[in-house]
Amino acid sequence: MSYDAYHLWKTVPNTEEPLLSIVIPAYNEEIRIIPTVGAIASHVSGLGFPWELIVADDGSSDRTVELLQRTGFANMRVLIAEKNGGKGSAVRRGVKAARGQFILFSDADNSTPIEEVGKLLNYLQNENYDVAIGSRAADGAEVAKKSLFRHMLSNGLRWIVKAFFRIGVKDTQCGFKMYTREAALRLHEAQTIMGFSFDLEILYLAGKFDFNIVEVPVSWVDAPGSKVDTRKEIQRFLRDLLIIKSNDLKGVYANA
């Protein structure tokens, strides 16, 4: 990482169109957001292309927005929501605000290290894919500190998705996904689920719209401090599976 490149990104607004926009959804992330933003900025600034960072706050009631605004980063925008609308809603707002040729959505806990970004970008930039999915289930992925319960749960949900949705992606829920700008805008415009399971709908739509999708093995660490209530999210996930299928049968996606 070049400190000069990092300092330039922090202090001087880009005059060129960004090659890459990185969108981070954030809800009450005052403990983790600054380390994550710092890690992303220091790494991506050294890759040699113009880029921007968008943090889509989701109605945080803590100091998340205040801490982000204090940084004064010239090429970071903080999108503020009046109320909590769900992770999918935050990502959707971030994608719509993005100006890059390619758009990455990454979780605020940096569970998939930003150093993996080059793998996904290569597939979109050089191999003509529309959507690149960071995966904890693809051959070559490295997963650390994942509990036995979460491992069993993930396998069960993957079986349900494969059996009933015919989505050719092993890991739909990893929070590290990149799209071309065209694919991102079309998918998130058609999005109807604004909660935790929005990823599943996006990938279902990507297949339905015949986008070229690649699943890329990444490193992943189960970061401490997760606010996800696993049991509640399982219920919502299963409910959203039915909503997606119902939407398709009703023709909700037909004109998207």
Image: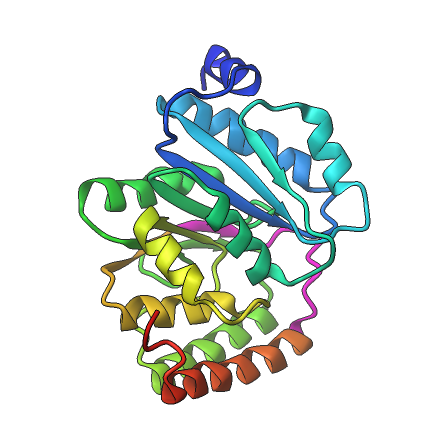
In the image shown, does 120 or 223 lie closer to the viewer? 120
Residue, x 18% and y 48% (percent of image)?
128
Residue, x 42% and y 20% (percent of image)?
15
Q: In this view, does 245 lie above or below 188?
A: below
> Can the viewer see residue 96?
yes
What colouring does the structure picture have? Answer: rainbow
Residue, x 23% and y 52% (percent of image)?
129
In the image shown, does 247 or 144 lie closer to the viewer? 247
**In the figure, residue 45 lies in which quadrant?**
top left
> Where in the figure is residue 14, as x and y percent of width and height?
45, 21
> Over which residues does the magenta segment extend?
218-230
> Where in the figure is residue 29, as x and y percent of width and height?
71, 47
Furthest residue toward left? 127
Furthest residue toward front? 255
**In the figure, residue 131 lies in which quadrant?**
bottom left
In the image shown, does 217 or 129 lie closer to the viewer? 129
Type of secondary structure dominating the magenta stretch: loop
Query: Viewed as shown, does residue 148 lie left or right of 51?
Result: right
Residue, x 73% and y 26% (percent of image)?
70
Q: In this view, does 245 lie above or below 176?
A: below
> Where in the figure is residue 227, as x and y percent of width and height?
71, 60
Query: Viewed as shown, does residue 43 lie left or right of 60?
Result: left
Residue 229 sits inside the magenta stretch = yes
